[in-house]
Amino acid sequence: MKALVTGGAGFIGSHLCEKLLELGHQVTVIDDLSTGRMSNIEQLVDNPEFTFAIESILNETVMDRLVCECDIIFHLAASVGVELIVNRPVEVIETNILGSEMVLKVANRYRKKTLITSTSEIYGKSEKVPFSEEDDSLMGPTTKNRWSYACSKAVDEFLALAYHQEKNLPVVIARLFNTVGPRQTGRYGMVIPRFVAKALLGQPIQVYGNGRQSRCFTYVADTVEYLIRLSKLPEAEGQIYNVGNNQEITIADLAEKIRTMSGGESEIVTIPYDEAYAKGFEDMFRRIPDISKVHRATGYKPCHDLDEILRRVIDYVRQAGPETLLAPGRD
């Protein structure tokens, strides 16, 4: 099989590429390196089964050639991270909506199966937990660009399902819940690498809000396993699946756990959302997935608990240098 991975130089994308190559597939990546990094895929570039195009997915000429030559598309390219959402909303909206439109249009031209990665943000401010795939979304007002990412990904889902229903394009949608692991950067607000880097540097660990908000974290290898299994299932076409782990922890407890496991003595401080992001910033209080549907479809359950995830991230950040995970820009 020859796979095209959009956003393949990103955190999740690079792990997906590694696994696909390990399974004996050919892999082509398209990534403009706006948030992806060459260092994520440097170990792959000498593999004769790996090809990399530094280009935007909005370039239809390039996309036409790459899609024509592949068997399946894993569409991971997106603008993500709370800091990007708040500070660069135009980029977020255009990249997500126009990028997915291009991928689906060209995929339909050549009738290529496409797996679209979406987000748990789709559920918005809903307080019904755990979230199941048929639950309603509850978004905040359009005056708060915090919700632009969630809405852009909702449009992606609507468009993908429309291509499936109207044009019979084989598409699968995976809603990802807080994937973490080695290579994830803290530059755009991702909480675990940010906390770990601060703890290892002995700097204050900044918890945004009151810390009582909770999340569930999924190890990247588990996310990749789910994506590959879903991509192989004909019965998954036209379906949406939550992909995540349902082990819940508050952000305050997460900060304490990371400080302890890192062996440091960093102070844990709370920063109001208005200071961390923007006045009137809104967040989801709990974000817990119902993963029964994806388990029934794939037969898989997450194999890595939170302590193991944190140990692996701490080891990675120590080796990479904690300051590099917080530095602005790209490499």
Image (cartoon, rainbow, N blue to C red):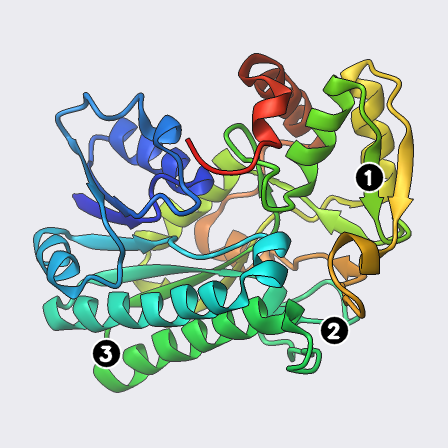
Front: mark 1 or 3: 1
User: Residue 207 placed where, x, y %?
Assistant: 83, 43
Crowding near the residue tagged with mark 2, few <14, some 14–19, many ≥20 C-alpha atoms within 10 Å: some
SS at circle 2: loop
Residue 296 position in % (x across, y down): 51, 56
Above or below for 184 versus 4: above
Question: In the image, is 117 to the left or to the right of 128?
Answer: left
Which residue is at a point 59% across and 76% down the rendered structure image?
Answer: 134
For the N terminus, which image quadrant? top left
Say which amino acid is labelled 2: Ser
Judge depth for marks 2 and 3 and give the one in front: 2
> Horizontal and vertical percent for residue 113?
23, 62
Q: CA distance from mark 2 to mark 1?
A: 26 Å
- Counting residues from the N terminus, which is met first, the one under dot 2 or under dot 3? 2
Viewer can see residue 305:
yes
- The three-letter amino acid code for the residue at tag 1 is Gln
Residue identifier under label 2 = 126
Q: Residue at x 61, y 37 (%)?
A: 186
Q: Label 2 vs label 3: CA separation?
A: 31 Å
Marks 1 and 3 sit apart, C-alpha to C-alpha, by: 48 Å
The answer to whether residue 133 is seen in the rendering is no
- Look at label 3 and name its amino acid: Asn
Q: Quadrant of residue 266?
A: top right
User: Disc 3 marks which residue?
Assistant: 168
Residue 139 left/right relative to 228: right
Mark 2 or 1: the one toward you: 1
Q: Nearer the viewer, residue 141 or 122?
A: 141
| Quadrant where the image shows the C terminus | top left
